Structures are given as C-alpha cells and as structure tokens.
Image (tube, helix red, strand yellow):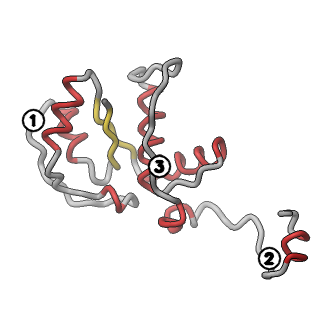
Amino acid sequence: IFGAQAEGCSPVSTAFKAGHDVVRPQKPRTIAKSLAIGNPADGPYVLDIARRTGGAVEDVNDEQIVDAIKLLARTEGIFAETAGGVTVGVTKKLIEDGLLDPSLTTVVLNTGDGLKTLDAVAPTTGPSAIIRPTLDSFREAGLA
C-alpha cells in the first residue's frame, strides 16, 4: 500500500523516509488544501501499513501537482482537484523510481472534481473558448 502527500504538508511522508514511527506536525504550505493536515491522527497507522505491505509514502511539490492534474486531463479527460494531482503525481513518481511496476494493475483513488480547485491551474491554463450563452455561439466556437 502506498500513500501520497503534498510536499508542502507531508508529515507522514517525512516520517516514512526518515524511518521514524512518530509523525511530527508540520504547518501546511501547499495548494492541495484538502490534504493539508499538518498533524494527521492516523499517521502512525499509515506508516505501519505501508511498511508491512512493502509500500511507501511519497510526496510531490505544487508544480508536480499541477503537472499531474494536466496530465490526467490530457490523457484521460478527467479534471481532478489538487488532491487528485497529488495521487497521480505520486503514482508517476513511484513508477519512475521503480517502486511500482507499470505492467501490473494499480488502483489509484481520485474522487475530487477539479472545479473545486480551479485556482490551482488558472495561472497556467486559460479558457479554451469564451462564448455567449446561445446555441449559435456554442456552434461557432466549434464545440458542437
């Protein structure tokens, strides 16, 4: 079992990498607000299950989160919120680091909608079309 956190709030990942059993609180500094839990009550349990299953707990920075949101949208047509960007970004990182075998089936939980965190991608992604609220304008924009 693998865990994913945003680097700007990664107390469990930090403890895992250091080999600690105690999770030290951190002040959240990340765009992944829904995952910004600086003192997770279940942190020790996550460390235990990751270690017992041969897994890991990894993190990605805010830039990697945005890149992962865009990757998922571009390749699968799924617009994830920042938490989904963390999940996809960490999955990508685990594959690149050889911790996940890309030939095996991996289940990635991604339950949030990107419309909740538009501000995370707005600076680097603009609207594809701006149209008046009419069917003709919709068609003129090439969206019909």
Please name the residue shown 51% across and 53% down the image.
Answer: 66
Q: Secondary structure at mark 3?
A: helix
Q: CB under 8 Å between callouts 2 and 1?
A: no
Mark sitting earlier along the chain (1/3): 1
Identify the residue under disc 1.
21
Residue 70 image point, x, y percent: 59, 50
Residue 76 image point, x, y percent: 63, 43
Quadrant of the image containing the N terminus: top left
Question: Toward the viewer: 50 or 98?
Answer: 50
Which amino acid type is shown beneath numbered disc 1?
Answer: Asp
Identify the residue under disc 3.
85
Quadrant of the image containing the C terminus: bottom right
Question: Toward the viewer: 33 or 14?
Answer: 33
Displayed quadrant of residue 100: top left
How far separated are the C-alphas under marks 2 and 1?
Answer: 54 Å
Q: Residues within 10 Å of mark 3 (few under 14, many from 20)?
A: many
Relative to residue 76, is residue 140 depicted above or below? Answer: below
The disc placed on residue 131 is 2
Which amino acid type is shown beneath numbered disc 2?
Answer: Ile
- In this rendering, the count of numbered labels is 3
Residue 27 image point, x, y percent: 21, 60
User: Residue farthest to the bottom?
Assistant: 133
Relative to residue 28, is residue 46 depicted above or below? Answer: above
Q: Residues within 10 Å of mark 1 (few under 14, many from 20)?
A: some
Mark sitting earlier along the chain (2/1): 1
Please name the residue shown 34% across and 49% down the image.
Answer: 6
